[in-house]
């Protein structure tokens, strides 16, 4: 049986957003996955994936650690002898695919977003662009999750043999089934799902939450996720004031979407926001940064409201506009959001695109 090796930086991300692809591959391939954590490893192993632990420094740029990652991938490929390699996120995309080039193994890449290292400019960006050019030059296919990322890579001369645009990771419309909009008006829950960090728009969110709660006591902000930057003190103070509730990482997020009046995504950059897709599939309006990776998933005034990234007053204004809507207007936005997901973001589209490219090279 032919072998597929998947390099990713998060077990939960692989399982939550790409499990449908894994299940399809397991029908005809021996599937190996390389991961740095154990979050969903029992589930992956139970389905039949062969799991390999590979340590990854997700956010740092330590040359020693990155070189160690390169050699770990090289050793793994020597052991597994895959017929094709799939990679996700920046470090697997770079160091895993450099190994693939050296070993002449076909590889398929997914650009899940540019990330701060690419977008902040300076010497770090020059290094990342150089490494990407080297790593992706022989890629059998590069999948992009939004058109802007695709254009930027082309501008920098980062190209492979072929590129394709897919609707992010898509969304499982059954897992995130439509939920009728809550008729309870006494509490308006604004939900944020993601890492608690500056680049996700946390400064703007906390400012807007404080201001809105002064005007609308029924508004409550709920954060589902773990700290990645130092917001502990300010968030604990907001909790004491009744402005927000911090909930840690949750394996099952759908019940939180169900309880929300709207879902917030004030991020500075995204490949394609899975949170927007999942919340929309559940039938919840979206308030999101008007940036590539978010703007594809909602329609301003139809399924939610957009606002410029990094603009706390614009976020606050979007929240005020939402509060002034009638119950039926909010519920209709949710129905519109679900319909958009059914039309444009069914995960089956992404799985089929992958299978086409994998069959072409393996």
Image (spheres, rainbow, N blue to C red):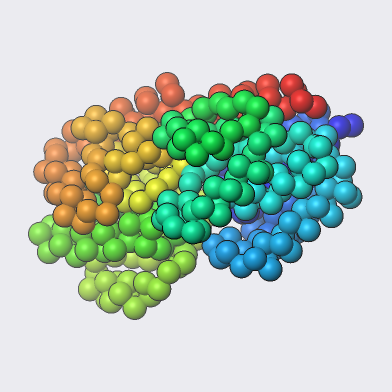
State which quarter of the image contains the N terminus: top right
Residue 252 image point, x, y percent: 52, 51
Residue at the spot 54% in from the left edge and 47% down from the top edge: 129
**Left or right, residue 292 beside residue 354:** left
* Residue that appears at 25% across and 40% down: 306
The image quadrant of residue 32 is top right
* Residue 86 visible to the viewer: yes
> Could you tell me residue 95's position as x and y percent?
69, 51
The quadrant of the picture occupied by the C terminus is top right
Q: Position of residue 133 (x, y in %)?
A: 61, 42
Count of numbered circles on the image? 0
- Residue 48: image quadrant is top right
Is 300 situated left or right of 8 in this image? left
Q: Residue at x 87, y 42 (%)?
A: 81
Image height check: is 71 above or below 86? below
Q: Left or right of 64: which side holds 289?
A: left
Residue 43 visible in the shown view: no
Q: Is residue 25 above or below residue 65?
A: above
| Residue occupying the point 65% across, 27% down | 161
Residue 314 percent location from the top left of the image? 18, 50
């Amino acid at each position: 049986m032919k072998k597929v090796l998947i390099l990713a930086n998060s077990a939960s991300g692989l399982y939550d957003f790409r499990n449908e692809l894994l299940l399809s591959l397991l029908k005809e391939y021996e599937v190996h996955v390389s991961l740095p954590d154990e979050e969903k490893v029992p589930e992956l192993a139970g389905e039949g994936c062969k799991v390999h632990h590979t340590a990854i420094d997700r956010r740092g740029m330590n040359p020693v650690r990155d070189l160690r990652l390169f050699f770990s991938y090289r050793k793994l490929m020597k052991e597994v002898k895959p017929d094709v390699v799939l990679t996700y996120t920046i470090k697997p995309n770079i160091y895993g695919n450099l190994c693939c080039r050296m070993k002449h193994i076909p590889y398929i890449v997914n650009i899940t977003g540019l990330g701060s290292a690419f977008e902040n400019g300076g010497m770090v960006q020059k290094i990342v662009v150089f490494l990407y050019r080297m790593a992706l030059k022989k890629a059998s296919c590069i999948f992009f999750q939004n058109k802007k990322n695709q254009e930027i890579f082309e501008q920098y001369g980062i190209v492979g043999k072929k590129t394709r645009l897919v609707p992010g990771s898509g969304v499982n419309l059954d897992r995130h089934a439509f939920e009728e909009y809550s008729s309870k008006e006494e509490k308006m829950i604004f939900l944020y799902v993601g890492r608690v960090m500056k680049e996700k728009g946390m400064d703007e969110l906390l400012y807007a939450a404080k201001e809105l709660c002064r005007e609308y006591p029924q508004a409550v902000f709920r954060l589902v996720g773990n700290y990645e930057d130092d917001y502990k003190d300010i968030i604990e103070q907001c909790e004491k004031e009744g402005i927000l509730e911090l909930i840690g990482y949750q394996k099952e997020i759908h019940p939180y979407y169900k309880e929300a009046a709207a879902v917030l995504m004030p991020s500075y950059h995204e490949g394609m926001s899975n949170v927007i897709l999942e919340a929309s599939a559940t039938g919840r309006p979206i308030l999101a940064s008007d940036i590539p990776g978010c703007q594809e998933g909602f329609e301003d005034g139809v399924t939610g409201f957009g606002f410029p990234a990094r603009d706390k007053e614009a976020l606050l204004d979007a929240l005020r506009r939402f509060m002034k809507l009638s119950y039926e207007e909010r519920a209709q936005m949710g129905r519109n959001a679900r319909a958009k997901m059914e039309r444009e973001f069914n995960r089956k589209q992404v799985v089929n695109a992958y299978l086409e490219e994998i069959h072409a090279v393996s």
